Structures are given as C-alpha cells and as structure tokens.
Amino acid sequence: MNFFLTIVVDGLIQASWLFIVALGLTLVFGVLKILNIAHGSFYALGAYIAATAVTMVAARSLPPSVGFVAMLVSVALIASAVGLLLERGLLKMFYSRDEVVLLLVTYAVFLILEDVTKLIWGVNPIYATQPYELFGNVAFAGLYYVGYDLVLIPISAAIGFAVWFGLNRTVTGKIVLAVIHNEEMSVSMGVRVNRVYAVAFAFGVLLASLAGALTAPKISMQPGLSSDVIILSFAIVVIGGLGSVEGAAVGAILVGLARAASVHLVPQAELFMIYLIMTAVLMFRPEGLFKRETARRI
Amino acid sequence: MKQGLHPLLMIALVAAVTLFGRVLPTWTLSLATVAASNALIALGIVVLARTGNVSFGQGLFFAAGGYGVALIANVWGVTDAVAQMIIGAVCGGLLGLVIGPLIARYSGIFFGMLTLALSMVLYGALVKSTALGGSDGFNVGRPSLFGMSFNDPREADFMLYAVSVITTGFAGIAATILFRSELGLASLAVRENNLRVEYLGISANLVITINFVIAAIFAGASGAFALMAQRHIDPQFAYWTTSGEFVFVAVLAGYQSVAAVFVASMALELVRSFSNLYLPNTWQLVLGVFLLCVILFLPRGIGSLWIRERQKRMRPTAATPIAAQKEAAL
C-alpha cells in the first residue's frame, strides 16, 4: 500500500510540471492550430533563464526566496517578449500555408533555439539548486519528500484552474473560445483574430518557460532537455486530445503516473510505456480522450 | 514529377552520375552516399505525401532496416552490400505491411503524431534493450560486393556510393513511373478529398496503405545504407529528430520533382558538413535558418527553381480549408 502511495505521489509531482508544459502546447494548438515543436525549447529557455536569475541572486547573497521570485518574474517577462516577437515576426508569415509547413517552421525554430541556448549557456550542465531547499522536507506516510516538489502540485493546480476560469468565465476567454471554435465567424463579429493569436502564442510560451523555471531547481540544465520535454508533452496532449484543457490535465496525470510506476516497477520501460499509452489512445480514440468528434466538409 | 523525361534517359543519367563518382574526391564520395541514402527515404516521404499524409516517424523503418541488416550481418555473416540493401528493404517493407493498414485510417496531424509515437516506442525499446547494445548500439563489419572485399578505403567508398546511387536512382525512376500511374493519380485525389475518392469506388485506405508500404521499403533500404556507411548502429536511428530531418529534405525538395529530392538531399549534406567545418557549434542554427529561408522564399521547394508554370496546372492547391480560413482571417 505504501509502495502504491509512493508511486501516486511521485506521479503527481511529475504530472504537476508536465501539466503546465502541456497546457501551453494544447492552448497554442487550440487557437493557432499549430503543433509547436519548439515548445520544448521554450521550456529549456525558461529553465536556463531561471538558473541565471537564481545564480545572480545567490551571488549577491540574498535569501533563496528572493531567488525564487526573481526567477519567476524574469522568466515571465522574457518569455512573453520572446513569444510575442516570434509570433509577430515569424509565424505570422506562414499562416496561409499548409499545417505541415507550420510544423516545419516550428521545427526550424527548435533547431535555432537549441543552438542559441548552447551559445549563451554553454554545453556543460548548469545547476540552480538554491530555491529547492526553500520549503524544507516533509514527512509524509513514512517517507520524506522535498517540500518544493510537493508545492509544485498546488501551484500547477492553481495555474490550471486560472486558465480554465479565464477561458470559461471571462469575456476575454469567451473571445478566445470563439476564435478556437470558428475563426471566420469571430472575424465577422469584430474579433481581432491576429491579436488573439499573438497573445495566445505568447501565453503558451509563457507557460512552457514557467514550467521550465519551476523545475529548474530540481534538475541539471544541459542540451537535449528540450527534445525530451517536447516528446513527453506531445504524448500528453495527444492522449488528452489536442486543444483540450481538461485533456491536458488527465493526460499529464496519466503520463506522470505511468512514468512513476515504470520507474519503480520496470525501470527499463519508461519512455516505452508512455508512448505505448499514446499509441493505444490514438488507435482507439484518435481525437484523444477528451475531444468530441467534429463534422467535416465533404 | 518531370513529365518529359523518358525512363531510358533517366537510366543513362543514373549511370552517368555513378561513373562521375570516379572523379569525385573521397570526402565528397561519402557525403554523396549519405545524401543518396537520405534522398531515398525522403523520396518515400514524398510518395506518401502525395496522399496528403506526412510521416514524422520514418525513423521507425529506417531503424528497422538498419537493425535488421546489422543483426543478420552479425549472426549469419551476410556482408554483401546488395544483399544488405535488400534485407533492409524487406525489413522496412514487412513492418510497413503490419503498420500500414492500421495507420491508413488517420489523416493530417493524427497521422503524423501516430507515426512519431510508433517510432518513439521503438526508440524507447531499443535504448533499454541490452542485447542490442542499449543506447550505445553496436558495430558491424565492412560490406563486400558479389564476393569481392574492399580493403582500399577509397574503393570501398566508391562501391558504396555506386550501390546507393544506383539504388536511389532506380527508386526515383520507379517513383516517377508510379506518379504517372493510376495509383499515383488516385493518391493525389485522396489528398484532395478522400471521401469523394471512396464514392468513385476506389479504396482510399488501400491507396494510402500501398504508398505507406512503398515509403517503408525505401526507408528500410535507406537504413541499410546508413548502416553500411557508418558501420555502426544505435537507437538514434529511430529518434524523432532523425525522422524530422528526412521530412526536412522532403520539404526542401518540394513535392513536384524526383530529381529535386536528390538535389535537396545533397544541398542539406553540403550545408551540414560546411557548417560543421566552419561553425562547429552552430550547425543546427544554420540548418534552421536555411530551412526557414527555403520555406519563405521557395515555397514549392528547390524543385521550383527549374520546374515552371507548366506543372502548376497539374498540381492541386496546397491550401487546406483551415489554411484558407486563416488567410481569410488575417
């Protein structure tokens, strides 16, 4: 029983940050209909920026709580700027083209960002562990957990709720939903679709980088981070259904639990398990667990 | 799809390119071998793309071919280059036959995601399989040809170059014939609207499956060449960035000419090796910028440099309903 509980808690910790990344990916897909391969790079970018912020704060011998706040603020600012810039400066030029072409554009962005991070931060692992001790250790069901890990769970739940609330209970959210549902109609109703696009993309980038920043104290930052994360978040959004917020949550929990379970039970099968789930979901419910079938034009 | 060229003329062209290898410097030979092998797999993607589906998991068949050949070479000592190529093609093709019918029901982004997922399943399995060397992979011996073994590295390089260019050349000729055939035209129709094709009495799924298997065969053979060129195999063959590069070549080429695939593949290898040489830490950056420039300035691919308006009438419009909507919205 205790063993089972360990898997569940570990799974939820994994799910918490995966959910934030996947939420960004699914929103960008919902609004812009782009499957953003560069999404993992934004995660890595956030993690690297956070590491720099934390190190700079620590160098001035300020307390780690200041480092925690500094990393979140700096990442939020830089990521939104990068997102806006990319959407307005680059993606905008390709909206009239095939979906596959847009996919390749984001692939090119992925390649470019991969080297840009290497140029700025080098190829050696970078650590930013100071905030990790911020919340102490917690004894829970006979096991010790790092407080920081457990704090991630309510943070991601809060972000998820905020996004859900923002989309479903505010006017701005309703406009975004209208754009997701039918773009042509929203244009004729006077919605500035290109503004919605820019904000949605920037918000997606923001979420990915925030997840990167939140996980930065837990991990070592090194090249290859982005391609690992994008592969996980693809699985999550496909399991949950592309463009669905609830789906991203369920997908993240499933993937988090699958990861934790395979780490504890069959460590060989980690990536294999996740992709097996994704394949199974695609085989039986290609639209994902949380998406209704839509009518198509004949 | 070059209309005018007669197949005999194409065979002559392949022969000329093969003989041209005698005068090429050694470093270009191995580069051209890799380019030809990548062109083969990209050709498969182009064949499949004519049905409107882009596979982001050709690495699956690439790795299947590579591992199949490597295992058979190490267990039974099959070192003949042509035999290895055929083994690779058979491995890819068999896997394609299993997966094709399952996957043919999907389209667009789901097709791409499913192929990607399958290749990542294989990757995940390969990385953890200690019997196959795990993430380090394993080595295989030097290939031979018809009982001749090549000890001089230059001769060995030329042999591999010749076999890969001839194979890829014939695959290109076969693809051209396929494009002009009923099946090839039906593929374009499936891309336009699969439901209408069904109403006309053709099974869209069957058309996609056949094209998928052809692409898998090409990918398997290409995996065999990659193995022969590197004499080493590892799970990276099945990783999604490997597959991404092949799609990259296909897009670079554009979907209208077989010759463009070869030119694009060679261009990519040249850009890669030169940026490796002069900008060792930023070759991905160069590659990304190169890709963006091609998409932006040559929307129909490198092939559009020499294929003119004539083809435009034949080609279906690329815009999907969604893309058209977006155009209207902006």
Image: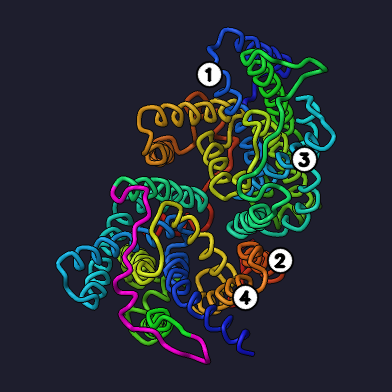
The answer to whether the residue labelled 2 contacts the one labelled 4, judged by CB atoms less than 8 Å apart, is no
In the rendered view, does A91 fall on the left or right side of B164?
left
Q: Earlier in the sequence, mark 2 or mark 4?
A: 4
In the rendering, which numbered label is found on residue A283? 2
Give residue B316's position: percent from left, percent from top. 58, 42
- Give the distance between the C-alpha atoms of the residues marked 1 and 2, in whole angstroms: 44 Å
Q: Is residue A109 visible?
A: yes
The three-letter amino acid code for the residue at tag 2 is: Met
Say the numbered circle drawn on residue A261.
Answer: 4
* C-alpha span from label 2 to label 3: 30 Å
Question: Residues at marks 1 and 2, common chain?
Answer: no
SS of the residue under disc 1? helix
Please provide the residue range marked out in magenta. A120-143
Q: Amino acid at mark 3?
A: Leu
Is there a contact, CB below 8 Å, between mark 2 and mark 3? no
Q: Most extreme residue toward the left, as rendered?
A: A60
Location of mark 3 (residue): B71
Describe the element under mark 3 as helix, strand or loop: helix
Q: For the residues marked 2 and 4, what is the alpha-carbon distance in whole angstroms?
A: 23 Å
Residues flagged by tags 2 and 4 on a common chain = yes
Nearer the observer, A95 or B136: B136
> Is residue A134 a member of the stretch shown in magenta?
yes
